[in-house]
């Protein structure tokens, strides 16, 4: 059996590039610099796993912590405007339609909350394409922990070795790997320089990806007896016995 679990931000829709650009410009408007290292560290992390938000960093740098909320709201307006004008990433809709035609279960495992993810999925007529939409508010820990992926697998009723995680970030790939899934990295313009060593394969595009290729990869994984992967599955079985 094959199931596919998509990350949302940066994978289905490139929210990462406009968000980075907006924050970079906002920092510069206050005479500050948003370093790439600072930004890259938080890409793909759940809100509850992010040590310091960009708004908090900027407010601290300008010596006025009280403006953090206002900075966050100001950035969100511009980010949403840019994302509203964006299209789905290349190959995403075609892959989803292929899966629906073949009866392949689909889910979303996101580091964002439902009030961010759901409206965009509805805007692009994708909300009903997924049997499960799992967000950071649905689990105790966000990425790079595997919790959102494990919940998605539970709701789909499939084993980790039967599923592919499609991600754009290093933290997301680490989460998929920790869940025991086959991990496909599909970086965007902002994330393409990150370390994707946790991914099984890195794709420049989802355009033209064949389901038979993904099915073959999953079949190979099901026959993989690597001790480290077996240990991961044993840990999952211990903590999440209902999905094994």
Image: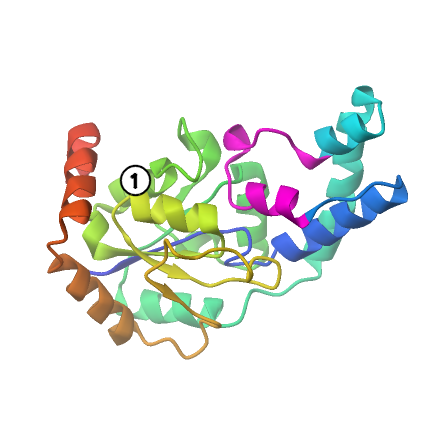
Quadrant (top left/top right/bottom left/bottom right) for the C terminus: top left
What residue do we see at 48% from left, 72% from top? 204
Task: Report if residue 206 lies within the magenta region.
Answer: no
What residue do we see at 55% from left, 62% from top? 192
Label 1 sits on a secondary structure element that is: helix
What residue do we see at 56% from left, 42% from top? 41
Residue 238 lies in what quarter of the image?
top left
Tell me if 177 is positioned left or right of 161 in this view: right
Rendering coords of residue 226 (x, y %)? 14, 53
* Res 132 seen here: no
Tell me if 128 is positioned left or right of 117 in this view: left
Residue range of the region highlighted in magenta in the rendering? 36-54
Rendering coords of residue 67 (x, y %)? 82, 25
Rendering coords of residue 168 (x, y %)? 49, 56
The residue carrying mark 1 is: 150
* Res 139 seen here: yes
Residue 68 lies in what quarter of the image?
top right
Q: 139 or 54, which lies in front? A: 54
Quadrant (top left/top right/bottom left/bottom right) for the N terminus: bottom left
């Amino acid at each position: 059996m094959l199931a596919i679990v998509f990350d949302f931000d940066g994978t289905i829709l490139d929210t990462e590039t406009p968000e980075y650009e907006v924050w970079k410009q906002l920092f510069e408007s206050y005479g500050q610099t948003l370093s790439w290292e600072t930004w890259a560290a938080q890409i793909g992390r759940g809100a509850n796993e992010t040590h310091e938000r960009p708004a908090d960093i900027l407010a601290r740098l300008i010596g006025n912590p009280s403006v953090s909320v206002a900075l966050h709201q100001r950035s969100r307006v511009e980010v949403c405007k840019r994302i509203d004008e964006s299209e789905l990433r290349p190959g995403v809709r075609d892959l989803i339609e292929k899966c629906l035609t073949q009866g392949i279960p689909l889910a979303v495992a996101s580091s964002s909350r439902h009030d961010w993810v759901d409206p965009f999925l509805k805007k692009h007529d994708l909300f009903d394409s997924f049997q499960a939409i799992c967000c950071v508010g649905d689990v105790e820990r966000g990425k790079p922990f595997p919790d959102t992926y494990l919940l998605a697998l539970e709701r789909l009723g499939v084993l980790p070795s039967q599923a592919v995680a499609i991600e754009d970030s290093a933290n997301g790939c680490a989460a998929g790997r920790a869940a025991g899934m086959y991990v496909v990295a599909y970086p965007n313009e902002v994330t393409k320089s990150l370390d994707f060593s946790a991914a099984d394969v890195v794709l420049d595009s989802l355009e033209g990806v064949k389901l038979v290729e993904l099915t073959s990869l999953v079949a190979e994984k099901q026959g993989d007896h690597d001790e480290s992967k077996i240990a991961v599955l044993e840990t999952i079985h211990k903590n999440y016995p209902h999905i094994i």
